[in-house]
Image: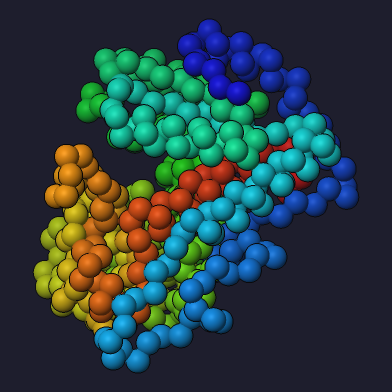
Amino acid sequence: MRACATAAMVALHRTLRNALHSFSAPSSYALFGPNLPDVWIPRENTSPHTHFPETFQWSNGNGHNNAAILEGKPIAKDIKFEVAEDIRRMRSGIGKFPRLAVVFVGDRSDSHTFINIKLKACDQVGIETVVAQFPENCTENELLDAVSSFSDDPGVHGIVVQLPLPQHLEEEKIINVVSPEKDVDGFHPTNMGNLAKRGRKPFFVPCAPKGCIELLLRHGVEITGKRAVVIGRSKIGGLPTSLLLQRHNATVSMLHAYTKNAEQITSEADIVVADVGIPNLVRGNWLKQAAVVIDMGANQVKDPHGQGFRITGDVCFEEAVKVASAITPVPGGVGPIAISMLLSNTLDSAKRAFGIV
């Protein structure tokens, strides 16, 4: 169920949900859900989807065969099924379900696309959504009031502020108003700080980095002891991905616009993660023979074979596939898992609110 939330509707929404806030779950009601130990692990009782017969084996680097394709869609499908089953049991067991608030500003076509994907995924698993849309010229106070209202609303378990925001709105100020316990995107300073500090556990890990690690683990790729390069240091992708890789005891180098000899550093890495938003930046000659390549980019480029556009990654797939031992496709790699992680985070937030974790 969706609603377009004005300020009045937000207030009404809060009033209607207050009655659902206090309850105790049956002691026998045990639900799965990932916690964040010192090393991130995938959900329990799930079998890895992999193109390899057993655990991933690092190639001998002869370069004669194309890389194995690390598909994300089967993993995302499994996670969505697990979340949907959990929500079904939640509804039947305690009569409650998760609710996600989505806040976005303006009419960017890419933002609309991403939001529609998220809303559709929520519908598929049984997460109720509330949408608050604001015009491009809305004031910062209007946006802050809406986000604060959702943060205070016990009937809302997760909040997503669709980025980027228009330039006249201070992004960090808006994100800081989101309750850390409802910050299912994992961008709040409290969550990012706890992710960075060894031994701490954030309420949530950003969805795309969490999906990146989940993909590696479910495909059986060994991380401990490997040299990893993360190209890009955004708070949405590169930075938290590097922190998660470090939690898995990889030796991590983070490359950015001011890095010298980026190609040489990348060529020494066993695992390469690209998240810069530049189509085909990473070429085949950047890569070490038999490296594992995770492409987190999603760039819209003109299709040379047609009139429209297509989505491509930050890695030149046609070249990299001949050098790497394994590589994610774009689309169809990290992206689908990232959406599933948003669902998982929202479910975990609801379980915490309902006192069943």
Quadrant in the picture for residue 59: bottom left
Residue 139, image x and y in percent? 31, 15
Q: Where's residue 203, x and y in %?
A: 56, 48
Residue located at (37% from left, 17% from top): 134
| Residue in the image at 28% along x and 72% along y | 321
Count all numbered tags in the image, as a single digit: 0
Q: Where residue 255 appears, x then y in whole percent?
A: 22, 65
Q: Quadrant of residue 13?
A: top right
Q: Can residue 321 be seen in this snapshot?
A: yes
Residue reaching furthest to the top: 8
Quadrant of the image for the N terminus? top right
Nearest the camera: 230 or 312?
A: 312
Is residue 68 left or right of 2 when viewed as pictured?
Answer: left
Drawn side of residue 117 relative to residue 1, left or right: left
**3 left or right of 142 in image:** right
- Front-most of residues 73 and 293: 73
Q: Position of residue 350 (x, y in %)?
A: 66, 38
Residue at point 41%, 85% (across, down) = 58
Measuring 44% from the left and 26% from the top, which residue is drawn there?
A: 103
Residue 341, placed above or below residue 125:
below
- Camera-nearest residue between 201 and 282: 282
User: Can residue 291 be seen from the camera position used here?
Assistant: no
According to the image, what is the colour scheme of the structure? rainbow
When the figure is inspected, residue 267 is found, relative to residue 236, above or below; the finding is: below
Q: Is residue 242 above or below residue 224?
A: above
